[in-house]
Image (cartoon, grey):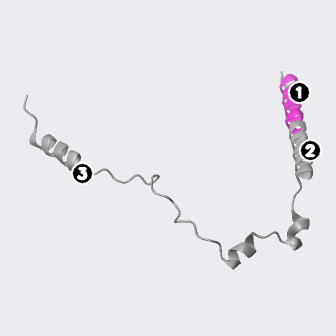
């Protein structure tokens, strides 16, 4: 069975074309360079901003309160829907 000419030329072009370089194989950043004075100053802890930091315990407490309020709202909505459907019949 003879192959059409365009298929054979396409196959030969695909075989001869080099594969494109994989972008993940090349490093996304250059070589390591030491930080300058400005970068080091920006990374240091600022005493003036220390009082605005969130603390782990208070964040956990607020999260628990939010979860409880969400549960209460879902429960109340479910109750209202159940009462509405029962009274409608």
- Disc with the residue nearer the chain's start (2 vs 1): 2
Counting other residues with Cα less than 10 Å from the Cα at mark 3, is it few (<14), some (14-19), or many (20 or more)?
A: few
Who comes first in sequence, dot 1 or dot 3? 3
Magenta range: 73-87
Check residue 47 for magenta coloring.
no
Tag 3 secondary structure: loop
Q: Is residue 86 magenta?
A: yes
Residue located beneath label 3 in the image: 17
Residue at mark 1 to residue at mark 3: CA–CA distance: 70 Å
In the depicted structure, whether residue 15 falls above or below residue 44: above
The secondary structure type at the circle numbered 2 is helix
Q: Residue at x 85, y 26 (%)?
A: 82
Find disc 2 in the rendering and name its residue. 65
Q: Quadrant of the N terminus?
A: top left
Residue 83 disc label: 1
The dominant secondary structure in magenta is helix
């Amino acid at each position: 069975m003879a192959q059409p000419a365009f298929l054979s030329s396409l196959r030969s072009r695909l075989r001869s074309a080099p594969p494109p370089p994989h972008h993940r194989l090349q490093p996304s950043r250059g070589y390591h360079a030491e930080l300058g004075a400005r970068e080091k100053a920006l990374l240091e802890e600022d005493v003036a901003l220390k009082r605005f930091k969130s603390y782990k315990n208070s964040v956990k407490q607020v999260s628990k309160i939010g979860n409880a309020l969400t549960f209460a709202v879902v429960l109340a909505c479910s109750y209202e829907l159940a009462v509405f459907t029962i009274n409608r019949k």
